[in-house]
Image (cartoon, helix red, strand yellow):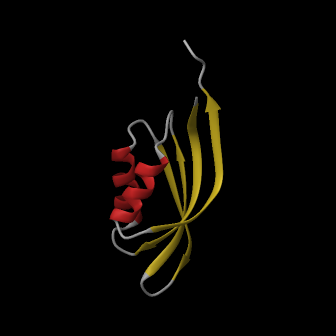
Amino acid sequence: MTSVKRIVLDVLKPHHPNGLDFTTTIAEKCPGSRIKLTVTEVDEKTETVVLTIKGKALDYDLITQTISDMGGSVHSIDEVEVAGISAP
């Protein structure tokens, strides 16, 4: 069994919600996580951002659904770190 510890996503998001609200909403769905948002490109209606999300056991499907619910879309997974979980 494995656990996702860190994931870096290239995301296209609308200007609203702003970066603070966007990351806060994701963090609320992933208790104990840490999220860094870096804006890499801005156009008239959207922003391209890089999200770096760290946690003990991240749920990729929940993260992508939350991004989608806020009007964003994941372009790519740029980095991922997983760890094996030992059986009891």
The spot of residue 34 in percent (x, y) is 48, 43
Name the residue rendered at 49%, 41% in the picture: 58
Indicate left or right for 63 with 77 as reference: left
Task: Report the number of numbered marks.
Answer: 0
Name the residue rendered at 58%, 49% in the picture: 7
Name the residue rendered at 57%, 58% in the picture: 9
Residue 82 lies, with reference to residue 78, above or below; the image says above
The spot of residue 12 in percent (x, y) is 49, 72
Q: Quadrant of residue 33?
A: top left
Indicate left or right for 59 with 16 as reference: right
The spot of residue 57 in percent (x, y) is 49, 35
Name the residue rendered at 39%, 75% in the picture: 15
Front-most of residues 3 and 70: 3
Front-most of residues 19 and 31: 31
Name the outermost residue toward the bottom: 44
The spot of residue 44 in percent (x, y) is 45, 87
Point out the image quarter for the N terminus. Answer: top right
Name the outermost residue toward the top: 88
Indicate left or right for 79 with 46 as reference: right
